[in-house]
Each structure stands twice: as structure tokens, then as C-alpha cells.
Amino acid sequence: MSKIQKGTNLAIEEIIENHVKSGKSPGISVGLVNENETMTFNFGETKKDSGVVPTNKTIYEIGSMTKTFTTILAAQLQAEEIISLDEKISKYLPELENSEFENKNVTLRHLLTHTSGISEFSVKTFASQIFSIMSTGKSRIVEYEYDTEKFLNYVSALKLKNSPGSTWMYSNLGFGLVGKILERITGNSYDVLVKTHICDVLDMKDTGIDVFESHKDELAVGYSFRGKQADYWNVPAIEAAGSLYSTPSDMVKFLKANLGLSKTILYPVFEYCQNTKNTPKIPLSMKFFTKSVGISLHSFRAGWFVFPQENVDILGHDGGTEGFSSFMCMNLGNQSAVVILTNRAMKPVHKLGLSLLQEINKK
């Protein structure tokens, strides 16, 4: 592939800057990667009216992009023979014995591919949550704030909506459960596990959960859909579903490693996750949602959505919290990738990310 062309940078800058000027986000950081070059762009403000422009070290909530880290972590622990993705989860969590999870043989693989049969919340509850975030920048899903004991008691009483493995259904609860299993088996917190098995290996020093406390001066301020300053995400029950913080610099390292552009012992695990295809197709309801934000969605691999683009499958994942929106995507064929981090909730950047991925590959 040719190097990013002179003049392409200006086009990319214009695309990103227009996103901020249109009022879609107070600030934005973008990382672009291909086999020859890495570029980052930062526009806007880390806090409204502060005049402080984001940098490569600015820390953002990455929301559900956390799920990709969780999947890689679980796959790595399987490679180390600490867990098996095909073992019943009731083996790891005795609290789930005699529940539907035991009777229907729900496995870690089911949880990681959104095929466990665990539902997300009802439409009414979800609608209330969306309205709450839009209006106040605050979450109202009490279950997300449960401690481990309350969370496991809550989950153990759930009834599965579908037979495990039969239907794809996005579930934050399922990924929250994965986190609790990994913590139980290893005796370490989710934050420590991600740092030890992924971040330390990739030299991602500013990624984790505790960076919220240790790097406060670098934190961007998040804003709700309606522009109100939002609370930072606090969801201990489902940390493994959406609690990580990261920076443009660290996320570029993560994507380069996933593309095989930087050498790492984790690459076999990255390939394993990227190539896991044994999941049901995405339901029409989810496809309608993704079309509403300007993209098409085909299927889900382990930790990655698949977006079909001009005869090539693009792998990616998005993230959204009470005050932040994010998206990452990569083309394995030509080893290119994009990550976008913004400090505005519910302003999808999927379409922007995919357009930038095309732009960096123009000759």
C-alpha cells in the first residue's frame, strides 16, 4: 500500500475539524494507522470554553470498546489454560448453580459473542435510560451500580430469552458477568487483569479504570446529548462491558498490535478473536439501528462487529457513555485502522470513522 499522500492530510483535517465546527462534539481526537505511517489529530476543547485543545495524552471514556479488551483478555487466559471459553459458567460461579445458566449450559463463549440468551433491559427501561442521559448526563440503571454480590443475585434470577447459541442479542449484562468470572478465577480485579495481560504488554500506560483517579489532569470533560456536563461512568457491576479509559496514543498502539504492525506475543490471540465467526447473524432490529447512524452491519466476531464495505469486511466496535462517544475500525486486508474519541454522548462517529478509513488509503 502506498504511503499516505501529501494533500490527504489536509482532507482528513478538514473532515475532522468540520465535525467539531458542526457542534457534534466539543472535542475530538483521531488516530490513523497504516503499514507505513501513524497520524493523530486533535481539535476542539477538552472542556467547553477552556481553550484547552486535546492532545495524544488526553484521557477519554471509551465505553463499550472495553468489550473488545475483555474478549481479548478472556482469550488470552484460555491460551494460558486458566479458563476454557467452552466451559459452563456455573463451574466458575457457584452462585449460578441451579439457575437457568446451569440448566441450559451457558458458556463464556456465549457471553463473549452475545449469544447467551441474557437479555438487555426492557424497551421501557432502555428508553428511560436514553432519556435520562440525553437530559441530565446521568444514568438511571440501578443494576449497573450493584456490588458483586447483588449483581450475581440479580443475574442468577434471570430467565433466558433464547436458547444459548441460537440468537444474537447485545448484552452489557453478559459482559459484566464475564468480568466477574475472570476476577473470581484469577483473584485479581478486572482493571489489574487488563493492565497485566494487555496494557503492560503493549506499553499502554494510560489505559485502565484507575486512571480516572491517577490522571485527573488529563481527563476530558464529557457532555450529554443536550450539551450538559455529564457524570463520569460508574458501573461497577459491568466494568468489563464499558468502564475503561484510554488515550489516542494508547489506542493507536492497540490497533497497530491488532493489525500485526507491531510485534507482540498477543498477536495469536488477536487473530483468534478476529477470525471467530461461529455466531448467529445480527437481527434486523440491530441492523435498523446501525443504518440510522449511517452504517451497515453484517455480523459479530469475538469482540468485533463486522461492517461490510465495498467487498471487504471492516472490523470495529463503538463506545458510548453518559458523556463520551467513540469508535474504532480496521481493515485487515490492507492493514489500516482508525480510532475516534470524543467528549459528547450519543453523537455517533461510526460513519466518520469509516470515511476516514477510506481516506487514508487513497492513492
Image: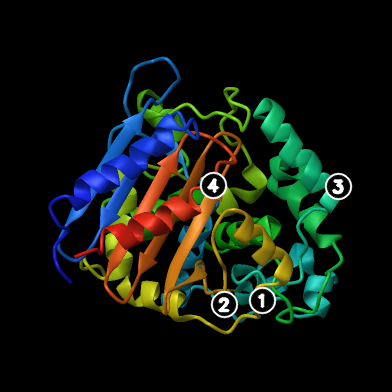
Q: Residues within 10 Å of mark 2 (few under 14, many from 20)?
A: some
Write down the quadrant of residue 178 in the picture.
bottom right
Q: Amino acid at mark 1?
A: Thr
Q: CA distance from mark 3 to mark 1?
A: 29 Å
| Mark earlier in primary sequence (2, 4) | 2
Discs 2, 3 touching: Cβ within 8 Å: no
Instruction: Give me the residue at 76% from left, 71% from top.
Output: 117
Label 4–label 1 contact, CB within 8 A: no
Foreground: disc 3 or disc 1: 3
Could you tell me how far apart the alpha carbons at marks 4 and 1 are, in whole angstroms?
32 Å
Look at the image and tell me in which quarter the C terminus lies.
bottom left
Q: Are marks 2 and 1 in contact (CB under 8 Å)?
A: yes
On screen, residue 300 above or below 61: below
2 or 3: tag closer to the N-terminus? 2
Q: Secondary structure at mark 2?
A: loop
User: Which sits earlier in the primary sequence, circle 2 or circle 1?
Assistant: 2
Label 1, on which residue? 107
- Mark 4 surroundings: few (<14), some (14-19) or many (≥20) residues within 10 A: many
Q: Mark 3 highlights which residue? A: 124
Q: In the visual, does 265 lie left or right of 22?
A: left
